[in-house]
Image (cartoon, rainbow, N blue to C red):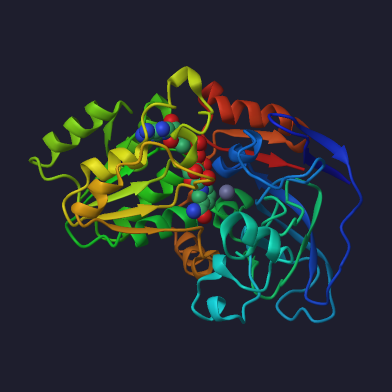
């Protein structure tokens, strides 16, 4: 089959690789019908993620049709359309029982490698390094889904791929980002980053009862989307001093009640993916620590890899900020959010700006990384 494979920094290619096979009685194989590129994939593309290997199949946002089933699978039959969470979870360990699926104790076969890099074993992830299990990803024609009864969710015929695909990651991620900000009725919520995760955090902040939502970025079309679809007020700069001053002005010198970091490692002096926009200088998390209200809530769905430079942790401590973060506990959110889509409360397809074939994936990565051609989200069709 054809699949998008990692070959080093900014080097991804479509290769011919062996078709996946059922390896465990709880597996299913799906034929991928739609897949997307995520901001987290850019961390792999920029070579920030340790334990990648030459030839690894990428992709963790995907959906498709069930074509093969292991003998223990109960939830699905051949031909079902499913959307698959990027987190692989066993469903029965201490963490899964607490619905903390991204911390699953048992789904990652490379426990030791994960421990070496992160101190503890985390759940397996599709297409996201060997420390997170070495599972092949979904930017491919076919993919094996372990623990199939725990993760994937059946999609009704009434919904298109484009309406359901983002339940695989960015909609639940934005939603958990807002939930972790512990928004109370009437709160002012500021969201750093108007990429796909930021856009869904904006949508979700309203669902949790925000009175005002302020979105921060420097890319015009993303800010426009935050205004148009997100009904957010926007700050059109990422300059640290300007953002702080603007937020103080907008909140009578108090600062936002809740702050969400939907930027992550990109802008934090790792190497800065987007040097042209001088994103290596402003550190969103540092801005959040400085701008957030005393005793306010800080939620960090943005992914960090390694160490963060120039983080004023003393501000966070002395201002008694409440911090919550983590990879999304996907399985907890997919069914309830699918229901919102079915009820017409949200149509996640608003985020799509580019539709390309799987063969064009190398080009698509470049476009998404460089934010060329007003790119916000790319959907690939195998
Ligand atoms: P993206 O790269 O498309 O968007 C990031 C946005 O941040 C860009 O629009 C950029 O212009 C903006 N930005 C950069 N520096 C900024 C600053 N200082 N202030 C304000 N905005 C700034 O990525 P995305 O797909 O939206 O993902 C965002 C983050 O969420 C990434 O770190 C990604 O890895 C992470 N993520 C987390 C999870 C999870 O489970 N927690 C899941 C998916 C993605
Ligand atoms: Zn993702």
Q: Name the residue: 17% across, 49% down.
A: 293
Left or right side of 328 for 34: right
Q: Name the residue: 34% across, 49% down.
A: 260
Pick the quarter of the image with the C terminus. Answer: top right
Question: Is 341 located above or below residue 278 in the figure?
Answer: below
Q: Name the residue: 39% across, 38% down.
A: 193
Residue 259: image x %, image y %?
29, 49
Residue 296 placement: quadrant? bottom left
Residue 161: image x %, image y %?
63, 52
Is residue 262 visible in the rendered structure shown here?
A: yes
Question: Is 358 located above or below residue 272 in the figure?
Answer: below
Question: Is 197 located above or below residue 109 in the figure?
Answer: above
Residue 205 placement: quadrant? bottom left
Question: Foreground residue, 142 or 111?
Answer: 111
Residue 82: image x %, image y %?
68, 63
Question: Foreground residue, 63 or 217?
Answer: 217
Question: Foreground residue, 29 or 96?
Answer: 96
Left or right side of 291 for 169: right
Q: Name the residue: 85% across, 80% down.
A: 71
Left or right side of 244 for 78: right
Question: Is 149 located above or below residue 367 in the figure?
Answer: below
Q: Among all residues in the image, which is located at the extreme top?
A: 276
Residue 151: image x %, image y %?
64, 69
């Amino acid at each position: 089959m054809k699949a998008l494979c990692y070959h080093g920094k900014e080097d991804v290619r479509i290769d011919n690789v062996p078709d996946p096979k059922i390896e465990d009685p709880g597996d299913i194989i799906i034929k991928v019908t739609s897949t997307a590129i995520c901001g987290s994939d850019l961390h792999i593309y920029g070579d920030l993620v340790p334990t990648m290997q030459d030839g690894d199949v990428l992709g963790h946002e995907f959906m498709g049709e069930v074509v093969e089933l292991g003998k223990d699978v109960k939830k699905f039959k051949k031909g079902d359309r499913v959307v698959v969470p990027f987190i692989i979870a066993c469903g029965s360990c201490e963490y899964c029982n607490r619905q903390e699926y991204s911390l699953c104790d048992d789904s990652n076969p490379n426990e030791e490698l994960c421990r070496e890099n992160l101190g503890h074993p985390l759940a397996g992830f599709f297409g996201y390094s060997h420390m997170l299990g070495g599972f092949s990803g979904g930017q491919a024609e076919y993919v094996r889904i372990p623990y199939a009864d725990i993760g994937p969710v059946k999609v009704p015929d009434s919904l298109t791929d484009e309406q359901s695909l983002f339940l695989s990651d960015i909609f639940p991620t934005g939603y958990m980002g807002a939930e972790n900000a512990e928004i109370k009725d009437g709160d002012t919520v500021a969201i750093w980053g108007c990429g796909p995760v930021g856009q869904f955090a904006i949508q979700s902040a309203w669902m949790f009862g925000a009175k005002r939502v302020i979105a921060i970025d420097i890319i015009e079309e993303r800010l426009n989307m935050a205004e148009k679809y997100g009904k957010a007020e926007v700050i059109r700069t990422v300059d640290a001093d300007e953002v702080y001053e603007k937020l103080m002005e907008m909140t009578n010198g108090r600062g936002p009640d809740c702050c969400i970091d939907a930027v992550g490692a990109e802008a934090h002096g790792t190497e800065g993916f987007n040097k042209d926009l001088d994103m290596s200088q402003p550190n969103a998390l540092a801005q959040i620590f400085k701008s957030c209200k005393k005793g306010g809530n800080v939620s960090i769905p943005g992914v960090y890899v390694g160490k963060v430079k120039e983080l004023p942790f003393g501000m966070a401590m002395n201002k008694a900020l409440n911090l919550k973060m983590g990879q999304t506990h996907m399985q907890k959110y997919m069914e309830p959010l699918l229901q919102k889509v079915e009820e017409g409360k949200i149509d996640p397809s608003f985020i799509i700006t580019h539709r390309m074939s799987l063969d064009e994936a190398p080009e698509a990565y470049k476009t998404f990384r460089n934010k060329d051609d007003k790119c916000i989200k790319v959907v690939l069709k195998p």
